[in-house]
Amino acid sequence: MIYLDNAATTRPFDEVIDVMGKVMREDFANPSSLHHLGVKAEEVMVESRKILAGALQVDPGEVYFTSGGTETNNLVVKGAAQAHRKRGRHIITSAIEHKSVLNTMHALEQEGYEVTYVPVDSEGLVDLQFLEEALREDTILVSIMHVNNETGAIQPVDRIEEILRKHHPKPLFHVDAVQSFARIPLHPHHSDIDLLTLNSHKIHGPKGIGALFKRQGVNLAPLLDGGKQEGGLRSGTENLPGIAGFARAAQLNFENIFERQNHMSHLRYMLRARMVEAFDQVVINTPDDRFAAPHILNVSFPGLQGEVLLRKLETAEIYVSTGSACTSGKNTPSHVLKAMGRSKEEVQGALRFSFSAMNREEELEQVMKHLVPAVEKVRKMMR
Amino acid sequence: MNEGMKELLIVKYGEVMLKGNNRPMFVNALIRNINEVFGDSVRYRIRKGQSMLYIEPEEGFDLDQATKQLRRVFGVLLFHRALEVEKDPEKIKASSVDYFAKALNGSRSFKIETRRTDKQFPQRSQEINNLLGAHIADAFPHLQVDVHDPDVTLFVNIRKEAAYIYRDKERGAGGLPVGTGGKATALLSGGIDSPLAAWLIARRGVALNALHFHSYPYTSERSKKKVIGLARQLAQYTGRMNLYVFPFTGIQEAIADHCPDDQLTIIMRRMMMKGAEKIARKTSAQALVTGESIAQVASQTMESLTVTNAAVDMPVFRPLIGMDKEEIIDFTRQIGTYNISIEPYSDCCTIFVPRHPQTKPKLEKIRESESQVDFDGMIDKAMEKVEVIEIKPEEEAMIE
């Protein structure tokens, strides 16, 4: 099996599974319980929070656990809108955000907020001038993803921060770092980021757990009312096995983050080169190396159906994606590629290969060995 | 409902009546199908009456559930949920007040309609109407009698064995009991049309098996699951059936490799028809059922249908032939297949659409193209790998 769908989700590290099993067996108590077992469970949580804070170089008190990227994005966007609505009702985001941001924005529009969607260029990078001109006095939040999940394009977070810094009053700056965390270094304090979305299952951790970095002093309204866990920002008994698994996964990623990053970049570079060499009509949707995350290569075969190529590869036990898997198995045309100005044929013919450090270079040979005849065959069938 | 009140279902089987000497056969088929829909786990008795069936619940029988199930049995024209009452005017009066209380409280006007099948009964229909009407008007002073346009109509049926009181009739699915009209193979693509075509033919009493052409990896695993979902929904009406999944990839590729672009669709459809005929013959089905409708797409022009039809030597039923798409959609919403059909997994009809298909194909030319490949041999080979999936109605399906 060759698994190249790591932007959708990753295989958990064995050590992650072990630590989660251990926590479920031994530290099953409620971290809020007053007895000794509760205290022990709380220790696991404190330790895990410290590990994540260390990875981000932030204070542990700035890390909040949630159920994942979707929840964190909802919490940030709705929570900021709610908490700052007296100051303004204008929000800026980009046209290529994840659905958990875009659809939350749409929900806010229903409630009377105004949202500006910053367009992207043909490489999938946000238009900074547009963003700067969109800023208003009543802009309360700017939400831009770090790495796009379909193309791997890295957004210029530091340059956006420079623009925001010049603006008064300065809006909150949120970065969805689900795809970049533990793949590209990013330190919220260095980049003056107020809110950051993190997630565990994209870095070989378990599903159902994520986190929010919230700079001290930033005000957010919670989504859930209840026992006021996580500083009142996220009520609900903590998912302790998930938290422990997430922390261990982060730890393992950061142990050799540069090696992992280099390895993935190399795989992406090689596959891109092989594609360009093998196919006349291939369109590369991932920007060039300076602006691309190490783990994603998105290409289009115009006139073919990416979905059919996906299944052709599947018959050789090679697993890829047509874009974003987040529309529950449905193949809706990518809003990201559309925003980049790609034609209908290019959007339909898109395939995304996404790597983890577990992939090996030999696997690329296998991919090409099956992809070349598949493209030829499908081209014949689709004429 | 009070202790000791006996509720039951009275089923009228309309068209089955017309079948003269074959009638017992039709009635028995209807009873068999009702038994299948209810399943083995519930207890009840079916009694045959003149031109109707009485379904008498025994302990634990869920009348609400049974009512829902009965709406989906072909051959049932209409049915009533009724109360059995002793044939005594006083008892009928008392029971009516009780049994209809809820309906009457929520209404402004009513009328009584009595039928007296038992001519020995002392009161005539009109007398019962008057007697009961007066009693009800006394018990519910807010009610007006309105014989032309009442909110509720209360029916009284005096039969030999007992009296029955009931209100609104429930419409059944109509048609004839499945299994009384032979057997056919219905092609299911996964689209909107084919399930309705199958349903309409089944409603005429025809037992079905279903057939799907699977072209993985060109079509997805999910599109096959969708077809299974459609078959399950159909099985709510037809009862248990087999779904045959025909591996079509090789044939599809051979068509693309050897036949001209503008003939791909028509040849694909002819090959499907040939495969379908083989399945039908092997499973003793006497006809094929498709969802074609004139000129809906290029492959369904009259010329194309003629060429498709010429691929087989058995009747092909196309009950949607004269229907508009809108009508088809409305109908499929009612039978519960629409929402399954629109799940967005591509099927062979959406993946393989050449840019300029022929709308007026010529049979000789098509045959000439087909002679390039040993399609008959390929079909025979594929027949060995047909997957059979048993579809049971009791498995989860979307209902209404």
Image (cartoon, rainbow, N blue to C red):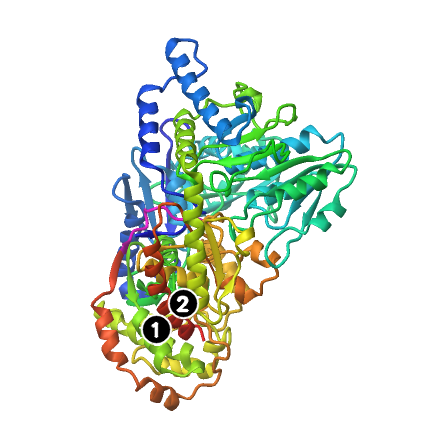
Q: Residue at x 25, y 61 (%)?
A: B387
Q: What's the residue at 32%, 69% (across, down)?
A: B249
Query: Is residue B399 highlighted in magenta?
Result: yes
- Residue for point 42% across, 52% down: A266
Q: Position of residue A89 (x, y in %)?
A: 74, 37
Between B360 and B179, which is closer to the camera in this rendering? B360
**CA neighbours of label 1 inside 10 A, class few (<14), some (14 to 19), many (20+):** many
Q: Secondary structure at mark 1?
A: helix
Q: Could you tell me what secondary structure mostly forms the magenta stretch?
A: loop
Q: Nearer the viewer, residue B374 or A244?
A: A244
- Callouts 1 and 2 close, C-beta under 8 Å: yes
Closer to the camera, B241 or B340?
Answer: B340
Three-letter code, disc 1? Gln
Q: Is residue A113 visible?
A: no
On the image, the x and y values in percent for residue A154 come to 56, 48
Q: Which residue is mark 2?
A: B348
Part of the protein shown in magenta: B390-400
